[in-house]
Amino acid sequence: MAEHDAALAALQVAIQTEIDGYSFYSKFAEQTEDPDARAMFERLAQDEAKHLELLRNVKATLEEDGEWLEYEGMPLPPVEGAPIFSRERVEQ
């Protein structure tokens, strides 16, 4: 059970990281005047939204069925959090 709870907690951290990333990129898309930069930030925000949906699905399946969704070719890196999307950087 502890492993299951740890996995859910890790997924929640990943979900929050995607939410923060979406906010980060969306904010800069709105603020930039350069059309190419705006398009890049909008694309990155869309990528974060896709990642968010995927992670929410994985978490829901783990919560409901106790099983992991399997996605081939997606190794999990041994990293905790993403400092680029820290609250301090997003709120600047």
Image (cartoon, rainbow, N blue to C red):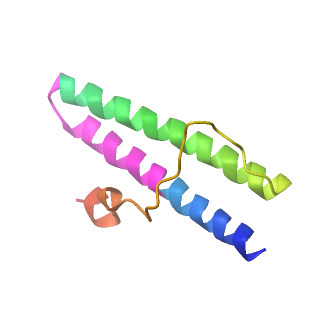
Give residue 69's quadrant in the image: top right
Instruction: Please tell me whether residue 17 is drawn above or below residue 54 in the rendered image.
Output: below
Q: Residue drawn at (22%, 59%), measured in percent from left and top? A: 92
Q: Quadrant of residue 4?
A: bottom right
The main secondary structure of the magenta stretch is helix
Q: Report the residue that reaches farthest toward the right.
A: 65
Q: Is residue 20 magenta?
A: yes
Inspect the magenta stretch and tell me whether residue 34 lies in it.
Answer: yes
Provide residue 50's location: percent of width, then percent of height: 53, 36
Which quadrant would the N terminus be assigned to in this image? bottom right
Q: Is residue 16 above or below residue 33?
A: below
Percent x, y of residue 67: 79, 52
On screen, residue 90 versus residue 3, left or right, reads left
Residue 46, compared with residue 74, is above or below; it is: above
- Residue displayed at 53% across by 46% down: 75
Q: In the picture provided, is 29 more to the left or to the right than 16?
A: left
Q: Which residues are magenta?
A: 17-35
Q: Which residue appears farthest toward the bottom when viewing the image?
A: 2
Name the residue: 36% across, 29% down. Answer: 43
Drawn side of residue 19 relative to residue 42, left or right = right
Camera-nearest residue between 36 and 77: 77
Outermost residue to the left:
34
How many numbered dots are placed on residues in this image? Answer: 0
Across and down, in percent, residue 2 comes to: 73, 76
Side of 63 relative to 8 (left or right)? right
Q: Position of residue 74 (x, y in %)?
A: 54, 41
